[in-house]
Amino acid sequence: MLYSCQDNYEDFINNLFDKSKTNDDIQEELLKIVKCLYRYVPYDENNASALKDNNLWFSFSSIFNDPLDSAAIINLADNIFRGRFSSEDEFSCFLNKWYTEIDNKINIEKNNFDKSSNSYDKQLFKNREEQYTNEKKIIEKVIKDKDYNIDKFVKDYYKKLGEIKLKTYEFDNAISCFSEVNNSVSMWSYYADGHKGICVKYDVRELFEKFKKKIIPVIYDETVQLKKIMSIDKKSCTLFTSTEKEKYLRYCHKNMAWYLEREWRILIDKDYISKNHKKLEEASIVNGCLCEGVIPKTIYLGCRMDRTNKDEIKTAYKDNIEVLDMNIDDLNNYIPPIIYSNKKYNNI
């Protein structure tokens, strides 16, 4: 069950994949929904540095606190095979072709790794080399099994192969999370270090200029939606494929338990990360990456922030960015100095 103000969010997501829609069309629709977005973070050394350099942090979904967030499952339905292979012989030919091409894929990833100087690219090439190596071991075992057929393959091997592929997907996209509101008590408590951190306001128009169609709203539903993203592409001899839209849907659906966060996300893919990320130490690449050139409009300071940190921020940004303290009124309702008009989520 969705909430009424999210109807236009689903339409917006669908329009992202409408080839007739230009960037200007999407931007116009986006600005009708939301004009600014807020990001809650602790004020620690990493976030202070990122803020100072106008960098935005993107996380890989594997470190999210909710294990169901951005999760996917392997489509084990029989028709995924029977609809694509007319006979067991055709399926056997597919596996043999797949096996003969794996070595070539492994060598390509090894060469890419040796040539690359980019730490993120090296991580991707290493992951894919490991994926193909593990695929080869399993397919070799299947082919040597004289009794294998489609049913046996699904039962004994397909899930293992899918789990290998899902693990590599963790590094194909990175996410930066925002909210429509800056006065959420729970988000200040949970994401901004118990009100000792900051909430950073960004102009949506400026975000769109940099990230275009990569800005997406989160849709909340009472049922957790695990996306079945696996299928077969016989031409490329690949067992695991998914459309661009399926990938997006994986990252923009969450359980209703989180709906008060009113979340939006910027989702960047591996090509964007490779070209735009700020180089990190090799040990840090497992968590995410930084993108440069994202300038905040306002910095809100948590009501429990240390006075030294408050003075540091106010001094550093006094000439170019608005800095405001958050206050608590007499009724213990958390309010920002500039009141934000919240839409109500009416159950329908």
Image (spheres, rainbow, N blue to C red):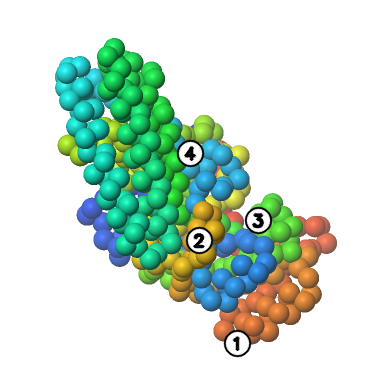
Taking the image as shown, residue 254 lies to the left or right of residue 46, namely left
Q: Mark 1 or 4, which is nearer the eye?
A: 4
Mark 4 and mark 2: Cα distance apart in space? 25 Å
For image coordinates 69% across by 70% down, the residue present is: 301
Mark 1 and mark 4: Cα distance apart in space? 43 Å
Q: Mark 3 or 2, which is nearer the eye?
A: 2
Task: Indicate which disc residue 319 carries.
Answer: 1
User: Can you give x and y, in whole percent of width and height, for residue 113 in the image?
Assistant: 35, 57
Report the residue marked by disc 3.
Answer: 191
For image coordinates 40% across by 64% down, the residue present is: 118
Q: In terms of depth relative to the viewer, which is nearer, 168 or 21?
A: 168
Quarter assignment of residue 29: bottom left
Label 2: few (<14), some (14–19) or many (≥20) C-alpha neighbours in 10 Å? few
Judging from the image, what secondary structure is the residue with disc 4 in? loop
Q: Earlier in the sequence, mark 4 or mark 2?
A: 4
Judging from the image, what secondary structure is the residue with disc 1 in? loop
Label 4: few (<14), some (14–19) or many (≥20) C-alpha neighbours in 10 Å? many
Report the residue marked by disc 4.
Answer: 71
Farthest top residue in view: 147
Q: In terms of depth relative to the viewer, which is nearer, 296 or 171?
A: 171
- Amino acid type, mark 2: Glu
Report the residue marked by disc 2.
Answer: 282
- Amino acid type, mark 4: Ala
Q: In terms of depth relative to the viewer, which is nearer, 311 or 263?
A: 311
For image coordinates 40% across by 50% down, the residue present is: 126
Mark 2 and mark 1: Cα distance apart in space? 35 Å
Judging from the image, what secondary structure is the residue with disc 2 in? helix
Q: Mark 4 or 2, which is nearer the eye?
A: 2
- Amino acid type, mark 3: Tyr
Judging from the image, what secondary structure is the residue with disc 3 in? helix
Label 3: few (<14), some (14–19) or many (≥20) C-alpha neighbours in 10 Å? some
User: Can you give x and y, in whole percent of width and height, for residue 121 in the image?
Assistant: 38, 58
